[in-house]
Amino acid sequence: MNQHESFEEIALAQWVDTARRHQAEGFRLVQMTGTARADYFEVMVSFDKDYRCVNYRVHVPREQPELPSLSAVFPASFTYENELKDLFGFNVPGLALDYGGNFLRTKTKIPFSGDVTLKPAKSKKSAQEEG
């Protein structure tokens, strides 16, 4: 990946079909990660083929944090999906290997499921003054 690669927004209903299409075209799963936003969770996934990454972003509602598993398409996705369960409290229907919320050991159970506080961005001038 390089800094110029962007993430395409997809609907939650396209999540599994997007993975299936890339698997059929010979792509491999590179990464999947989540971020808590004020009004939703954001999950990003990347696929690679011949040193070319394609990246997708999907919004998952906070009131129903459910993300269909990709483990039937890319078996190794079970690690990422168990992390999403443990860190954000996601329900992942179809997860091939489910650790039941015990994949990661964290001090706080489901640490990223709470409220998100957005801090104002620092201006370039104040950031330069600190540095």
Image (spheres, helix red, strand yellow):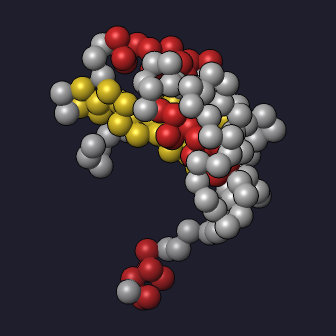
Residue 72 in picture, x, y percent from top left: 50, 18
Res 67 seen here = no
Q: Position of residue 93 (x, y in %)?
A: 67, 24
Frontmost residue, 11 versus 79? 79
25 lies above or below 114: above
Residue 4: x and y in percent read: 29, 44
User: Residue, x 44% and y 88% (percent of image)?
Assistant: 130
* Quarter of the figure with the N terminus: top left
Q: Residue at x 23, y 31 (%)?
A: 52
Quadrant including the C terminus:
bottom left
User: How many marks on residues?
Assistant: 0
Residue appearing at x 58%, y 41% in the figure: 82
User: Which residue occupies the foreground of this view, 76 or 5?
Assistant: 76
From this view, report whether residue 6 is shown above or below residue 112: above
Residue 43, how many percent across, how many down? 56, 39
Q: Quadrant of residue 58?
A: top right
Q: Residue at x 50, y 74 (%)?
A: 123
Q: Would residue 112 be seen by someone viewing this image from the given angle?
A: yes
Q: Which sits in the foreground, 66 or 54?
A: 66
Name the side, left or right, on which 32 lies relative to 88. Answer: left
- Find residue 107 and report its image quarter: bottom right
Q: Residue furthest right?
A: 63
- When the figure is inspected, residue 107 is found, relative to residue 29, above or below; the finding is below
